Each structure stands twice: as structure tokens, then as C-alpha cells.
Image (tube, grey):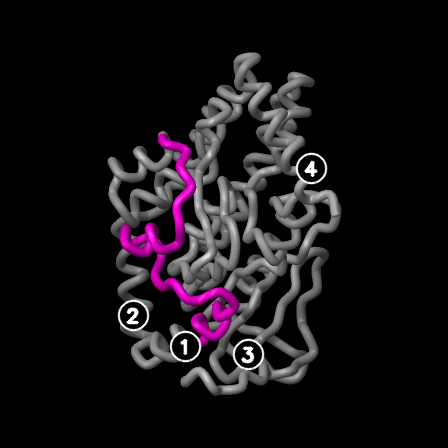
Amino acid sequence: MNNNTVYRPDAKVLAFSQPLVETRYDGALSVLWITMAVQKGRPQNFSTLLLQSLQSLIDWVHDNGGVWSDGLRDQPVHYAILQSLHPTYFSVGGDLRHFLECIRGGDFQSLRSYSMQCLDMMYRWATNITNKCTTIALVQGRALGGGFETALSADYIIAEEQSEFGLPEILFGLFPCTGGMSLLARRVGLNEAEKMMRNGRIYSARELYEMGIVEHVCPRGSGERAARDFIAEHSKRRKARHALQQAKSRMMPLNYEELAKVVDDWVAAAMHLTDDEMRVLDTLVRMQRSEFAH
């Protein structure tokens, strides 16, 4: 597909509708596009409503046998692409304001319940959408914390050049709790994964491409075209390449019980943050509230 190709998505009656999630199906490439809507007046994070909507969509596709239905015919979902409608952010990850409220209120159960909901969404996206589907995270902005972890849970990450990635939890005394260690270790090994979780750095898309974490970097505004080009090439040997992806998953499986234990460790650590760490978390909450106020 050359740069002058005009893309005309296959218009259909959508078979799935949930708050904060927009979907469209491209029959020409057998692609399900999943777009996280802008959450006006609040950070572009994983609110409970967004998590529920994403979980419902993933379960719907899985339970429907990996096909998309418009009421007239069923068509296969060979590729699923997750992106964000926000112009600057893919996702800032967890709901820091909720974290802060739970910690200040000593509400261990609510904090764990929310964290497990985040884990379940990520785990579903990584393992459950369909065993015949290749997943892609299309990042066109900042992917931080749980946003970065969600991108990592896809088979491939395609990023526009302005995109940035990071796991900043260490700055307020915590660590990624929804698979960050396991997902990074799959791509760069355990030692490098631990280093990235410890340093709190923000990485450019180009840096992560050179590390082998991001599959492809493209110019600003060309992400969707790059994703379609990638799929057009991938689909030429789709069955073989998908078999390789499945082999990698078998060799380096995500262990749900271990991931849940990390959540328990994370919640226990969160409930014992120091006063200084709480002040950093409060500052981040206020910064997010100000940045996303309009």
C-alpha cells in the first residue's frame, strides 16, 4: 500500500456498543479497530467504566468465536488494534485519584478490587480475545504506567514518533502492578525489565524501537496507515507468523496467579506509603486534574 492510497473503511452496522469504547470493523483486512474515547474533564486513564467496556468487548469477541457480526454475516477478526482518541495520550494508566482516596481512607478492599479489574482487562487483552487473532497497540501519544503495560500486552506496538512511554510508579514508592515485569521480560529479558521499572524514565518511541520493544515507529499522524501497512505485510504469511506468536506465548506464558500476587504486593505497599511518597502522589493527581480539566 503506497502513501497515496485512500482508505475507505468497510462501513457496517456495529454489532457491539459500550460506553467509552468505539469500534469499527474493516472487512478488507479483517481488522477490528478498538478506540478508547476521550474522557472529558478527567485524565485519560482506566476508569472503572472504561475497564468494564473493554472487558465486555474482549469477552464478546471471544465468546462469539473470534468473529465480528453485523447482523447479516459473520467475518473473522484476524487483527485487533487498540488506540486512543485523545490527541496527546494513549493512556496515563491507573486512576491515581482513586488510589489516593483508597489509601487515605484505609480502604484496602476497594484498592485491590480496582487493581484486579485492571489486571483482568490486561490479561483478557493479552490472552483471551481469540487464539486466532494478532493484537496491535497503536500508540499516538504518551503511554504511562498501566497505559504502557496495556500496550505491552499486545503482540506488537506501533508508535508515532512523538509517543513516549514510561513506568513512573517508582517516583511515589510503588511499581507496575498489572504485568509490567512479565510483559517487559518477554521482550527484553528480566534484568533490563527490572532496570526500566526501577529508573522511572520516560522513553521515546525511537528508544524503545532500538530496544526491540516497539515494532515500528512512524511519523506523526501516520499511525493508522502504518498499522494497515503492517497488517497487509503480516497477512501475507499470517498463519505462519501467528503460529510463531503462539509458540512465544507458550514458551513465556503469563501466569495469572503470579500476576495476582503482584497485585497483592502492590496494594500492601500502597497502603504503607510514607508521607513524602503520598505528597508526590498527591502532586501527580493535582497535575493530572489540571492538565485534563478542559
Give the side of residue 188 with respect to residue 56, left or right: left
Q: Report the quarter where the N terminus lies.
A: bottom left
Q: CA distance from mark 4 to mark 3?
A: 36 Å
Q: Which residue is mark 4?
A: 289
Where residue 4 appears, x then y in whole percent?
47, 86
Q: Which residue is mark 3?
A: 26
Give the side of residue 193 with respect to residue 60, left or right: left
Image quadrant in which you'd find residue 242: bottom left
- Marked residue nearer the N-terminal end (4 or 1): 1
- Residue 26: within the magenta? no
Q: CA distance from mark 2 to mark 1?
A: 16 Å
Q: Is residue 88 above or below residue 4?
A: above
- Marked residue nearer the N-terminal end (2 or 1): 1
Q: Amino acid at mark 1?
A: Asp
Which label sits on residue 229?
1
Question: In front of the other: label 2 or label 4?
Answer: 4
Q: Which residues are magenta?
A: 199-228
Question: In front of the other: label 4 or label 3?
Answer: 4
Give neighbour class at mark 3: few <14, some 14-19, many 20+ (Cα, 10 Å).
some
Q: Which residue is mark 2?
A: 241
Q: Please say if the residues under marks 1 and 3 sit with CB atoms less than 8 Å apart.
A: no
- Marked residue nearer the N-terminal end (2 or 4): 2
Give the side of residue 137 with respect to residue 182, left or right: right
Query: In the structure shown, which secondary structural element does the residue marked by tag 2 occupy?
Result: helix
